[in-house]
């Protein structure tokens, strides 16, 4: 399964632009099937924040992963894998025939 991390929303201080909280979404994709989970995470105050205008989504994703740590990141992947397994073996489906 392929995973994609997206930053949905940032909260920042207007005085210096420091991002102190983000909402992120992780997608798992396998063929045409897609699963996802969303959460929020807070960051500690920084004496030298990266200017808001200079921050990229890749920067924030790396901050989120660093804050989560490998164990929690892997738990997200495990959770998405279970969702995908459940979706693949579902006895029902939804959609339209056209």
Image: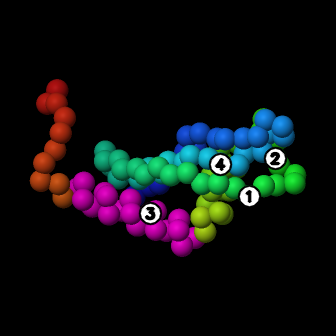
On whether residue 76 falls in the magenta region, the answer is: yes
| C-alpha gap between disc 3 and disc 4 | 22 Å
Residue 80, given in percent of the width and then of the height, sits at 38, 59
- The 10 Å Cα crowd at callout 1, few under 14, some 14 to 19, many 20 or more, is few
Mark 3 or 4: in front is 4
Residue at disc 2, secondary structure: loop
Q: Which mark is residue 77?
A: 3
Q: Quadrant of residue 84?
A: bottom left
- The 10 Å Cα crowd at callout 3, few under 14, some 14 to 19, many 20 or more, is some
Principal SS element in the magenta part? helix
Residue at disc 1, secondary structure: loop
- Against 49, residue 68 (above or below) is below
Question: Residue, x 16% and y 30% (percent of image)?
Answer: 96
Q: Are marks 1 and 2 in contact (CB under 8 Å)?
A: no
- Against 24, residue 95 (above or below) is above
Mark 2 or 4: in front is 4
Question: Which mark is first along the chain, 3 or 1?
Answer: 1
| C-alpha gap between disc 2 and disc 3 | 29 Å
Q: What residue is pinned by disc 4?
A: 21
Q: Which mark is residue 50?
A: 2
> Quarter holding the N terminus?
bottom left
Q: Quadrant of residue 70?
A: bottom right
Q: What residue is pinned by disc 1?
A: 44
């Amino acid at each position: 399964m392929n995973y994609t991390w997206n930053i949905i929303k940032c909260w920042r201080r207007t005085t210096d632009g420091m991002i102190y909280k983000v909402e992120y979404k992780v997608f798992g994709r396998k063929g045409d099937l897609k699963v996802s989970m969303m959460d929020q995470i807070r960051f500690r105050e920084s004496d030298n924040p990266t200017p808001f205008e200079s921050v990229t989504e890749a920067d924030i994703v790396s901050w989120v992963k660093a804050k989560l740590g490998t164990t929690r990141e892997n738990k997200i992947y495990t959770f998405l894998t279970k969702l995908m397994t459940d979706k693949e073996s579902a006895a029902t489906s939804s959609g339209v025939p056209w």
